[in-house]
Amino acid sequence: MVVQDLVTIGNKLYEIRKKRGLSRMEVAEKAGLSDRTYADIERGSVNMRIKTLLNICEALSITPDDILTESQPESLNKEDFLRRLDSCSASELETTMKLLSIYLDSIQK
């Protein structure tokens, strides 16, 4: 299940950072963010761009799945996925493909 709640995402980032023994400032610096911005992200009080999410994941040596999913993903039925893609408009399909490409690039580093 995909997490969409910013507070939950922030809490996961906090827990991972603490387990890694890193300070908020260290993660912010590695991710190219100000300490204040990263603190706001951990509190769940601001939304972040995909690039920011990927930078934070790199700084923490995690994948986006580690913070964007609640539990182990259910087995994906390829046919259902393709059927859902078929029902997308051209614009929605383009956005989906861009997001999928960014995600796959991030986990294959």
Image (cartoon, rainbow, N blue to C red):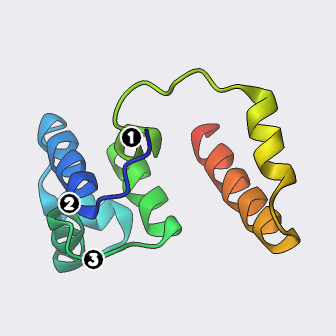
Element at label 3: loop
Which sits earlier in the primary sequence, circle 2 or circle 1? 2
How far across and down, in percent of the image, does residue 102 sit? 66, 56
Which sits earlier in the primary sequence, circle 2 or circle 3? 2
Q: Residue furthest top?
A: 75
Q: Residue at x 20, y 60 (%)?
A: 7
How far across and down, in percent of the image, does residue 86 sit? 87, 51
How far across and down, in percent of the image, does residue 52 sit? 44, 68
Nearer to us: label 2 or label 1: 2
Residue in the foreground of this view, choosing between 64 and 80: 80
Q: Inspect this view and state whether residue 63 appears.
A: no
The residue under label 1 is 61
Q: Do the residues bearing badges 3 and 1 touch, measured as CB atoms within 8 Å?
A: no
Numbered tag placed on residue 7 in the rendering: 2
Q: Check the picture and name the quadrant holding the N terminus.
A: top left
User: In the figure, 109 relative to 103: above or below?
Assistant: above
Q: Residue at x 76, y 68 (%)?
A: 92
The residue under label 3 is 46
Q: Residue at x 29, y 59 (%)?
A: 5
Q: Inspect this view and state whether residue 102 appears.
A: yes
Going by the numbered disc 3, the residue's amino acid type is Val
Quarter of the rendering containing residue 45:
bottom left
